[in-house]
Image (tube, helix red, strand yellow):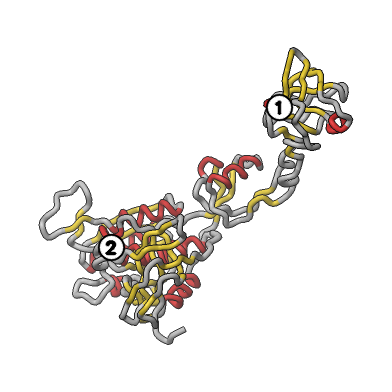
Amino acid sequence: MTDTPFRIDVAEAEQLIRNAMPEFGSCTVPLAESTGQVLAEPVIAERDQPPFDRATMDGIAVTAAALADGRREFQCTGTQAAGAPQLELGSADDCMEVMTGAVMPAGTDTVIPVERINKTGDSCVIESDYAAAPRQFVHPRASDHRQGDTLLEPGFVIGAPEMAILTAAGQATIEISRWPAIAIISTGDELVDVGETIATQQIRSSNDRAIEAALQLAGCRTTKRSRLPDDADQLREGIAKLHEEAGVLILSGGVSMGKYDYLPGVLEQLGVRLVFHKILQRPGLPMWFGVSAVGKPVFALPGNPVSTLVCLTRYVIPAISAALGRCNEEQDMELAEAIDFQPDLCWFLPVATDKQAGIVHPRPTNTSGDFIGLRGTTGVIELPRGRTHFAAGERFRYWPWRA
């Protein structure tokens, strides 16, 4: 670690943020409200899966012993439907019709597909050229897992597979990590929201909505957007109020060295302890991070849109996700084309992913204000300091826009 919180390396910034993050706790919600959230409890199997020997093919259920004795014709004595109570085969000379997903009738252990039998009345004859293997098309009881097995560990994000597992485990409610309420604050006299009249010298306030969208895609449901002018008193009053309401503050703009960049001074006046200011990277060098007197993280991101999204994607969302206990795996991607970068800074290069080839194509923007240039990109790759040439075929850490 350096002795000063100014102009630090990317890895140091990441570690300082992680070390400063609080715990946000957990809550129990109905299963239907858990999609996209981080699991906070282990999920235990309530019973064997499958809970019975299960037919995986429509056809007839017979005994392998009868087949081994050379029997090819069986008398059908009933139909075992999916969801119906288990029936019992009366004799090895008999068979039962069985539907996909049904419990295997007692006394049977093999399924002959319906396409390979000729049925006349109750008589079922197996085609002469069909050779059946014992226990074919039977999904054995407990072959997936046994009652009491751990199916999911805390840290999983609940998607479609996890939802299926939770449902199979009989979980009507589930404990998830609690997202903090997040205040998103855009600063600047030039910002105008959609639906409002805009003057020639003004711009639309896009950063706050982009931040909110990224947080929502990551699973956050408790965000509040605000815009504050370039006025120290109004910034101090507005931030103080939002600090009381939220668990995390994310600000955009006002953290550089300009005449109207009041945020560092205002945050200091509000008792927010500076952890670091400025990271040796492009875009996003002016990023500011601190912790309030009551332990709430305060992220002050540069105002240029590309810088905002890079810092949000690289630091803010990963840090909150880690605090929630989310299982995050590092991703590396292969660079499709060689590219050069002269400044002694870490370069977060926008890229478009070719999923089929498993590579990323560079899509550099004109400037850090060129958010239109991000159209069609999937994220950024992290090209480290200390180098000027990055060759095609090399692999680098990849940060997708969508967590």
Q: Position of residue 321 (x, y in %)?
A: 49, 60
Which quadrant would residue 191 be assigned to in this image?
bottom left
Which quadrant would residue 58 be assigned to in this image?
top right
* Residue in view at x 64 percent, y 40 percent: 168
Mark 2 crowdedness (10 Å alpha carbons): few <14, some 14-19, many ≥20: many
Q: Quadrant of the C terminus?
A: bottom left
Name the amino acid type tagged 2. Answer: Pro
Counting every numbered tag in the picture gives 2
Residue behind mark 2: 305
Residue behind mark 1: 116
Does residue 125 appear anywhere in the picture?
Answer: yes
Q: Position of residue 157 (x, y in %)?
A: 54, 53
Residue farthest to the top, as pictured: 121
Name the amino acid type tagged 1. Answer: Arg
Q: Nearer the viewer, residue 289 or 108?
A: 108
Q: Which dot, 1 or 2, sits closer to the camera? A: 1
* Residue in view at x 38 percent, y 81 percent: 387
Q: Left or right of 92: which side holds 318? A: left
Residue farthest to the bottom, as pictured: 3
* Helix, strand or loop status at disc 1: helix
Q: Which mark is residue 98?
A: none
Does residue 82 appear anywhere in the picture?
Answer: no
Mark 1 crowdedness (10 Å alpha carbons): few <14, some 14-19, many ≥20: some
* Helix, strand or loop status at disc 2: helix
Q: Position of residue 49 (x, y in %)?
A: 71, 41
- Say whether disc 1 or disc 2 marks the residue closer to the N-terminus: 1
